[in-house]
Amino acid sequence: MSKNTNKSKLDLTFLKPYIGWTVLLTLFIFLSNGANLLIPRILGESIDNFSQNKDLYKLSPDIWLLAVISIFVVLISLIQTVISIYISERVAKDLRDSLIKKILSQPISFIEEKDSSELFTNITSDVEQVKDIISQGFASIFSALIILIGSVVFLLTINVRLALIAIISLPIIIAVFAFIFKNIFKLFRSSQEILSKINKVINESVIGAMLIRVLNSQNYENSKFDNVNQQGRDVGLQIINVFASLIPTINLVSNFAIVTIIWFGGRQVMLEDLTLGEFSAFISYFNLLITPIFILGFVSNFISRGLVSLSRIQSVLDSPEMPKQPKKNLISNKVKGKITFDQVSYEIKGKILLKDISFSIHSQSKNAIIGPTGSGKSLILSLITGLIQPTSGQILIDDIPLSQWDSDYIFKNMGLVFQESILFNTSLRENIVFNNKVSDADYTKALKTSNVTEITQSLPDGVNTKISERGTNLSGGQKQRIMLARALVRNPNILLLDDFTARVDIRTEKEIISSLSQNYPDLTLISITQKIEPIQDYDQIIVIMEGELLATGKHKQLLQSSIEYAQIWQSQQTT
């Protein structure tokens, strides 16, 4: 959990669009509970009237009135339930929309800090807990307040001395609730955090199922899941133990009060200071007085969970937005593709990942970045996109600082093929076109250039074939080529390939690079690679090791000027 979670203040602005519905719900709650409060009084009068009436088979008008009120309460309660469910479902949708928009607009560092399993819990479980507050908690709390206040008023109007005996028990019960709520809130926070851990373990186990089988590490994964599962069980049992002490304590206090009321009230009935009907109504109102306490005991479970979940959701929604930089109005200008790194450094948590990197890439040129794993090659591509900001130095596109460009405009002119294949559970065509409006000519050109046409011919429904989750019905090379087609279909001026050659053989790679030169002649290409063979004729090769720039130049130049590059070339030739 981030520290921001604990500091977030509860914010109910998400209810603003539903003020009208909330007021209407409040009115129906008041009507239904107000009518309920009349029943004991009418029932008490009926008892007194019945005791004076000698005709046992004649129905009192009070009985008809009770029947009408009961039907009224049922109808109003039904409408109240429908309204509360409607509001809760709409609020849940709004919260999920706000969360996903917030997450998608955040920098990469936010996603890495939060952890995907925690964000998944925010969007699913946490939203459901907040929904429960609205669908049940609001109505229950407001009903409890109306019944509580109304019962006290009616008790005082019947008999002041007996009412004081009944009211004395309330501070004790309230003190018990305050103590339990103080402890239960911390437990529910722990419960939601453990749920995030469980989601993370499940997600890792499902994604890595094949590797787990191959490594025969099922027992290790099971023990990992058992560990977090037992933590969840232990916290759940602690919650149950806390609530287990609540109801018996309230029962003890209320039963002691009832015994006292019967003792003193019974004497007053015998002395005719109190009628039997009034005494019966008083007992009913005392039970109504205790009812809100039991209601709060029932709803305090999901109210506590909901408040914890709401604070977790707000910790995401309150996260600072990406800094807004002044934008240069270049919408009418075409991005040419010249890229300059001017003493760029990047560090995270005190660790320097890139140090004083400076190089220049000409527009419409083919460039490669080569170096061992962990040298910072992929980080350079992320910096070019603007997804992460350099710690120092600056990056320029067409001699203009990247921070001054409109990021949306830059993304429209840039294509990126990630090292990890990211495919969606939809058709092959939708995976390529995504949300872009493209012409048939651009679509066909992208498929042909990336060699995806061969893939479509081998699939049962061609481009309409549905890609399975994570693209398991495709090979690694096929997935990479589909991602390349997705990048090319936008007609980019800058194309970034992150280790694209890792899953594509040299022959196919050379065919694709040749097609790129023919079909996209104005393209600025930057390719991260481990293989020197396919990039020998590139305009520039950038050698990176341990976050530092060692050399730049063409293949033949680097063989003469860079010992490290020559060693890599010799080792690959030997292999």
Image (cartoon, helix red, strand yellow):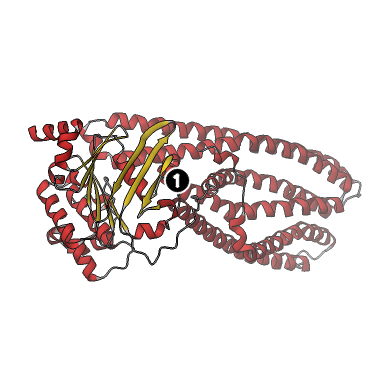
Residue bearing the label numbered 1 = 119
Left or right, residue 66 beside residue 354: right
Residue at (74% x, 60% y) in the render: 34
Residue 324: image location, x then y, percent? 50, 53
Residue at (28% x, 39% y) in the render: 208
Front-most of residues 430 and 38: 430
**Which structural element holds mark 1?**
helix
Front-most of residues 505 and 29: 505
Disc 1 residue crowd, few under 14, some 14–19, many 20+, Cα 10 Å: some
Farthest left residue in view: 574
Residue 95: image location, x then y, percent? 51, 55
Left or right, residue 411 beside residue 450: right
Query: Number of labelled discs?
Result: 1
The answer to whether any part of residue 280 appears in the image is no
Q: Quadrant of residue 553?
A: top left
User: Is 230 placed above or below 283 here?
Assistant: above
Residue 513: image location, x then y, percent? 16, 53
Front-most of residues 532 and 537: 537
The answer to whether any part of residue 63 appears in the image is yes
Q: Quadrant of residue 357?
A: top left
Residue at (72% x, 45% y) in the render: 290
Q: Quadrant of the C terminus?
A: top left
Residue 360: image location, x then y, percent? 30, 47
| Amino acid type, residue under disc 1 in the picture | Leu
Left or right, residue 542 beside residue 386: left
